[in-house]
Image: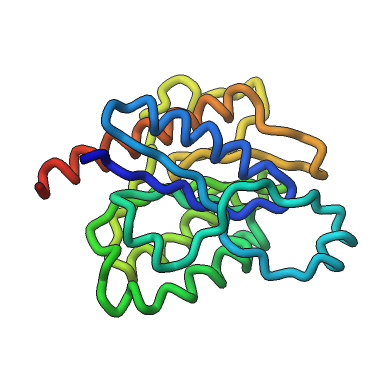
Amino acid sequence: MATKVYIVYYSMYGHVEKLAEEIKKGAVSVEGVEAKLWQVPETLPDEVLSKMSAPPKTDVPIITPGELAEADGFVFGFPTRFGMMAAQFKAFLDATGGLWRAQQLAGKPAGIFYSTGSQGGGQETTALTAITQLVHHGMIFVPIGYTFGAGMFEMEKVKGGSPYGAGTFAGDGSRQPSELELEQAFHQGKYIATITKKLKGSAA
């Protein structure tokens, strides 16, 4: 039976989605792991999104709270809003009360990735404040620590991410994830998929 990893994200301008795609590539590079991309529902009306110059959403399927129970592990991604996860993702998690009551996600590993507008814009606090959501579900937070190696110590180039997880800087929206940021995202997917597979095997 394959190990299922769900990469669940919200992306307004595509930066988080690009990281998600790399995380999926990393996850499926682990033998016996299936990975699937999911978007959470949008909460803003089209009129508002248009005024914010947000591009149309891609055809990645929209997840419902109940579908989370099918996965063995997760990587959750979102842009920051004042140092915390975007409201769209919080609204989705707020709808998982049924899973919480039954503790259906308890014991399942989960990682976090994110995008911020600037270097001081929440690369660590966005992940740190999101951990409370995992705790109440009894999930196991899996940070990448410094397992990415030398890439964690890059000082010459602007690089998002932290020991909490992969990240990128959007700037004014024109900056796209760098090659190093994408490599870190791939690493995170592979790392969490490996741990998820081990945990599932030990529980069998």
- Using residue 135 as the reference point, say whether residue 185 is left or right of it: right
Question: Closest to the observer: 49 or 129?
Answer: 49
User: Residue 155: x and y, percent?
Assistant: 60, 24
Taking the spot 23% from the left edge, 58% from the top edge, the residue there is 107
Q: Quadrant of the image for the N terminus?
A: top left
Furthest residue toward right: 51
Taking the spot 57% from the left edge, 28% from the top edge, the residue there is 182
Question: Closest to the observer: 139 or 3?
Answer: 3
- The image quarter in which residue 45 lies: bottom right
User: Residue 103: x and y, percent?
Assistant: 26, 71
Taking the spot 56% from the left edge, 63% from the top edge, the residue there is 89
- Using residue 182 as the reference point, say whether residue 120 is left or right of it: right
User: Residue 146: x and y, percent?
Assistant: 39, 32
Query: How many callouts does the rendering have?
Result: 0
- The image quarter in which residue 188 lies: top left
Question: Closest to the observer: 60 or 189?
Answer: 60
- Using residue 36 as the reference point, say whether residue 195 is left or right of it: left
